[in-house]
Structure formats: C-alpha cells, structure tokens
Amino acid sequence: MSLVLDHVTLTYPDGDGRLTALDDVSLTVPKGTLTAVVGPSGSGKSSLLAVAATLIAPDSGRVAVDGTETTGLDRAALTALRRDRIGIVFQQPNLLPSLTAVEQLQVMAHLDGRAPRGALPRALELLDAVGLRDQAARRPHQLSGGQRQRVNIARALMNDPTVLLVDEPTSALDHERGAAVLDLLTTLTHQRATATVLVTHDRTHLTAVDQVAEVHDGRLTVPAATV
Ligand SMILES: Nc1ncnc2c1ncn2[C@@H]1O[C@H](COP(=O)(O)OP(=O)(O)OP(=O)(O)O)[C@@H](O)[C@H]1O
C-alpha cells in the first residue's frame, strides 16, 4: 500500500479550544489507483492533503508513505521523503514566469542538489506524456490555463513519486479542459503506478476514478469499496 492514513486526527487552535479538522480518518490508496476526496468547503480536504504530504503532523494516528512510517521522522527525513516519494500539484500552477515549460521541470532536478543528469530527456518525456512535447520552449504566458496545469502535473512527476497529491486541479478550467485534466491524471496514475489523491469539491468529472471518499466535518467515509 502506498499511502495509508490510519485513524488520523488533526486539530487546530481555535480561540480557547481546538477545532477538529480531521476526525479519526482512515484511508488507504494503493499504487496505480486514483482516489478522489470530495466534500464541501471547510470539511477538511486541504487538511487531509497536508497531512498526507507530511506537511502537517496529525495529533494522533499514523501516516505511512510507500511503506515508510512518518511518525517520529525528523524534519530532514521528512523533507527527503517528500522530495523522493511525493509529488504535489497545487491548485494554481505556480510556474516561474521566466522559465520555459521544459525548464520548469528541469529545475526540479536541481532542487535536491544532485547533478541533473538525465533531467532533460526525462522532462521531455513527461511533457510528451501530458501532450505538450511541442510546447516545451514556451513560457507560462504563452500557454493556456489547461496547458499550464499540465506542466504543473508533469513537474510533480519529475522525481518519479510514489504518491501524487492533487489539489483542485480543475477549479480554474472550463468543463472540457477540466475533464481532459482528470482523464490525464487517471492515465498517468495507471501508467506510472502512483497512489494518487485528488481533492475536489466538484463531482462532475469523477466517473473514472477508482475510489471516491467523502469528507464532512472532518469525518471521512468511503462508500462501498470501489478500488
Ligand atoms: N491553519 C488553520 N488554523 C485553524 N483552523 C484551520 C486552519 N486551516 C484550516 N482550518 C479549519 O479547519 C477546517 C478544515 O479546513 P480545510 O481547509 O481542510 O477544508 P477544505 O475542505 O479544504 O475547505 P476548502 O474546500 O474551502 O478549501 C475548517 O473549519 C477551517 O476553518
């Protein structure tokens, strides 16, 4: 199992008390499958993604990424785990304005301090996988919103993550482009055997996902196993 959340509870300070953002949440996402997490605003979706990304430690419960238990890992170990095993696609493609599409990906290979040998062929291969091989030399302002989101997705795959976490990828896109991005995520999940979690409040495009989990007031339910 590539991503396991086991009885995870997360609270935030709230005035004199605590607000429970995740309430005893358990979720398992096997490799090569896509789980959509749906729920209304404020239900806990972003908190779930942040805990899965090991950006926030839960108050209690267990998070395991690609077989590694994250509880008790120090900051350096968590940073390395995120760098090597986790890809994150944020809602807004936060691309660097001055870099071309292929450079947005290549820069990922520089971040861990290793010589980016093989970074260019890999970046081009990933741009090809997201249908943008011929846009490799374009800068963000020369790309459409949907194309920018594809670059964003390709970039998250640069380090060959096991776990892919995606936050509302279709919110800035029209219906057709949103559906295309979801199709692409489904295909990449199967091809690259990632354990993918997609957070969304929009159920329209969810027909092809492997599992839909619903979150309400921090409580997660997975209707009759769909994986
Ligand atoms: N840093 C924080 N400090 C205190 N409370 C927080 C913090 N972050 C989120 N919350 C609260 O935790 C609950 C869950 O928030 P979360 O952002 O996870 O929901 P969400 O489902 O992602 O919402 P949205 O769809 O609007 O992004 C909400 O009640 C929110 O107000």
Image: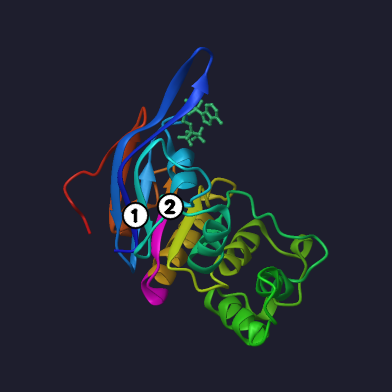
**Image spot of residue 8 (x, y percent):** 34, 40
**Image spot of residue 78 (x, y percent):** 52, 57
Where's the C terminus, which quadrant? bottom left
Residue toward you, 99 or 170: 99
Q: Is residue 192 magenta?
A: yes
Residues shaded magenta: 190-197
The answer to whether mark 2 and mark 1 are in CB contact below 8 A is yes
Q: Residues within 10 Å of mark 1 (few under 14, many from 20)?
A: many
Q: Secondary structure at mark 2?
A: strand
The alpha-carbon separation of the residues under discs 2 and 1 comes to 6 Å
**Image spot of residue 161 (x, y percent):** 48, 69
Residue at image coords 20%, 43%: 223
Q: Residues within 10 Å of mark 2 (few under 14, many from 20)?
A: many
**Image spot of residue 145 (x, y percent):** 65, 56
Residue 127 falls left or right of residue 98: left
Residue at image coords 76%, 77%: 137
Instruction: Give the image quarter of residue 155.
Output: bottom right
Amino acid type shown at disc 1 = Thr
Amino acid type shown at disc 2 = Leu
Which residue is the site of mark 2? 198
Q: Is residue 201 visible?
A: no
Q: Which mark is residue 35?
A: 1
